[in-house]
Amino acid sequence: MKISPISNTYNFYGKKLKNKKQSAPLSNNENSSKTEKGKNAVSFKSIYLENIVDLGMVSQQTAAPKFLKKDALLLNEIAQDYPNQDCFIRKGYGGYPYLEYREKPVDVQLFNSAIYNRYTTSIDPADDECPVEPLIIYPDSRYNIFIGLNSFISLNPSLAYTIKAGFEVHKKLLEKKMQIMETIGRTDPVDLGDESVTKKAHKAIEDVEIAVIRYLLESAYAAVSDRASAQQIYESNYPKVQSRLDAKRKLDLVTSTAKRPEVNLEKLDSEKVDICELAMRNFPNVDENKARIEELTRYMSMKGMSIG
């Protein structure tokens, strides 16, 4: 066994994990995401949308599902924070989304030129080193209408924020996977039974995932129970997202690192909140979380509440 070259020993916000040795050199992709000290980098297009997903009102307005510009902007901003991970938005229960994640392979992506000169990519979800794994919203999840659709304002825990939470849970999975690989990766082959290392790691972080799901559903319930005010809608952050992304795109096109502005990474790290830690702090009991998830899903379904 070997550790994927783009797995790393860093936590979610760039700080080294305690008591861990780096087991493999950083790849070029990872170096570009960390960059030189005091610099930043931009990465887009690590979120994919299956062409038969029902996005609610959006899919009713177009022949194929497509995000409105304000939602696409937000997803692009989220994608740039996770340059070594992919998210796949797929058709789940009721035609609404479910989510899959994978560690981005180091290989150059293959594609085919199909009918009408359309480009189609070739992705193997069962890749041995970088398998695709469902997280947060599963194919049979009935709460995908509450945290799986686009919100009418940016303050709601809609699909974009659910995807971001999924990225964080996936990082937890990759971190646990690395811990397992560090334990057995340099020894003789070990029989893990019918489950892969990824499945083992997923089971090990199941309590975190369930806590995050509850956190998102609690937020959705609060949002639909107490509708946003006109001021909150007015102060919605989509215009800020667009201007920020435009600036970052221009920055990414600057080839000389000497022209890149200084960024205080420590200040940025201190301002970020780890949703996994927050959810586990608020909802530490797994059994209570499972029961509450069922209760919220049933109640909001009966009342016809939707976050979209």
Image (cartoon, helix red, strand yellow):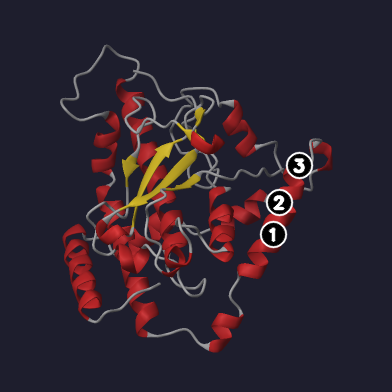
SS at mark 2?
A: helix
Give the answer, above or below, for where 266 lies relative to 273: above
Q: Quadrant of residue 235?
A: bottom right
Q: Amino acid at mark 2?
A: Lys
Q: Which residue is mark 3?
A: 253
* Mark 1 crowd level (few <14, some 14–19, many ≥20, 10 Å Cα): few
Q: Residue at x 39, y 45 (%)?
A: 170
Q: Which residue is mark 2?
A: 248
Alpha carbon separation for disc pair 2 and 1? 6 Å
Q: Are marks 2 and 1 in contact (CB under 8 Å)?
A: yes
Q: Residue at x 57, y 53 (%)?
A: 76
In the image, residue 254 lies at what x, y percent? 79, 41
Q: Are marks 3 and 1 in contact (CB under 8 Å)?
A: no
Q: Amino acid at mark 3?
A: Leu
Q: Residue at x 47, y 60 (%)?
A: 160
Alpha carbon separation for disc pair 3 and 1? 15 Å
Camera sees residue 298: yes
In the image, residue 24 lies at what x, y percent? 49, 22
Q: Quadrant of the N terminus?
A: top left
Which numbered disc covers residue 18?
Answer: none
Give the answer, above or below, for where 207 lies relative to 241: above
In the image, residue 88 lies at what x, y percent? 41, 46
Q: Quadrant of residue 230?
A: bottom right
